[in-house]
């Protein structure tokens, strides 16, 4: 394989954020919560492989369409100006081609599931493709991102149970709230640049009340998690995981009181541990059933 091909592959890897797995993890944890809750334990290897593979593919495709939509904005933001599309190292035609290929692969993967789940996946694809454009006019694109990121939850319940029970929609609501929380921290990093170039975000919408709103969303999310535990009879292991998640939330919000970019970005990254501890609580609780 010659050097030029290797360089091209490297640019494609950067475009799909394979070097930054945090987005995949934040997308994957709610799917894992849903699979374990729906199956009341391990959902089976086949379902696990399908959903993990589908998550990786759709997250990669989502990064491409996001960068395609922002290709004229990213050069003016310090954190994003070196992205392959922004730096013009990858053409828009290449990006769209790669996006289509990844989405086709994702569709082939989801075809292993039942018809109802396949139909839900079409909604997920629409949400994924349209999210980046909401930043132009919608004051809370993080809310739309949460819906897009959370759509794997009803898909997981449908794949396991053949329906989405009420607890599935509660988990979906939790996922939407969580995306608003961590992506507001992320948006706080770019707030000044976004104001200058006209991009909308909850960090701008919340303004000086940003941390108060985040703290409120965190409290509501924890209350809904407690409700999930009660509905599913998860007991002490899950309740302990909620306590650890609450401590992580307090640390994140407190660390961002100066609203410095590095601290806000660290708070965003630390949400991976929130997803992890919630999953551990669910997994341990369902082992006892």
Image (tube, grey):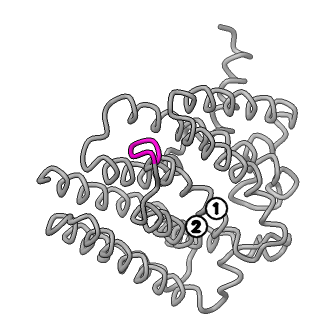
- Camera-side residue: 202 or 54? 54
- Indicate the position of residue 99 as horizontal and vertical percent values: 74, 35
Write down the quadrant of residue 80 in the picture.
bottom right
Quick one: 121 or 186, which is closer to the camera? 121
Q: Is residue 237 above or below residue 130?
A: below
The mark that comes first in sequence, 1 or 2, is 1
Overall secondary structure of the magenta stretch? helix
* Residue occupying the point 75% across, 45% down: 65
**283 drawn magenta:** no
Residue 275's x, y, as percent?
A: 38, 59
Please report the residue visible at 63 percent of the width from the left and 31 percent of the height from the top: 107
Horizontal and vertical percent position of residue 142: 64, 68
Are the residues tagged 1 and 2 within 8 Å (C-beta)? Answer: yes
Residue 183 tag number: 2
Q: Eyeballing the image, is 136 above or below 60?
A: below
User: In the displayed structure, would residue 8 be above or below residue 71?
Assistant: above
Q: Nearer the viewer, mark 1 or mark 2?
A: 1
Report the magenta residues as a range: 158-162
Q: Is residue 90 left or right of residue 7?
A: right
């Amino acid at each position: 394989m010659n050097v030029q091909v290797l360089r091209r592959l490297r640019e494609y890897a950067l475009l799909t954020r394979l070097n930054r797995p945090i987005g995949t993890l934040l997308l994957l944890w709610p799917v894992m919560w849903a699979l374990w809750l729906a199956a009341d334990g391990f959902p089976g290897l086949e379902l696990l492989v399908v959903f993990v593979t589908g998550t990786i593919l759709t997250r990669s495709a989502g990064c491409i369409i996001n960068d395609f939509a922002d290709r004229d904005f990213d050069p003016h933001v310090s954190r994003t100006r070196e992205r392959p599309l922004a730096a013009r190292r990858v053409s828009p035609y290449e990006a769209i081609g790669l996006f289509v290929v990844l989405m086709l692969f994702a569709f082939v993967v989801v075809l292993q599931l039942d018809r109802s789940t396949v139909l839900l996946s079409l909604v997920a694809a629409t949400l994924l493709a349209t999210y980046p454009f909401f930043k132009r006019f919608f004051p809370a694109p993080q809310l739309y991102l949460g819906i897009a990121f959370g759509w794997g939850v009803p898909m997981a319940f449908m794949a396991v149970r053949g329906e989405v029970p009420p607890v599935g929609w509660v988990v979906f609501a939790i996922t939407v709230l969580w995306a608003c929380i961590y992506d507001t921290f992320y948006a706080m990093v770019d707030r000044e640049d976004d104001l200058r170039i006209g991009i909308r975000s909850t960090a701008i919408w919340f303004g000086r009340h940003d941390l108060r709103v985040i703290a409120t969303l965190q409290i509501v999310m924890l209350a809904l998690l407690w409700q999930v535990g009660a509905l599913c009879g998860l007991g002490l292991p899950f309740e302990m995981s909620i306590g650890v998640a609450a401590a992580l939330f307090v640390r994140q919000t407190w660390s961002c009181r100066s609203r410095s970019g590095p601290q806000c970005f660290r708070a965003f990254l630390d949400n991976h541990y929130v997803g992890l501890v919630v999953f551990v609580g669910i997994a341990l609780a369902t082992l006892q059933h």
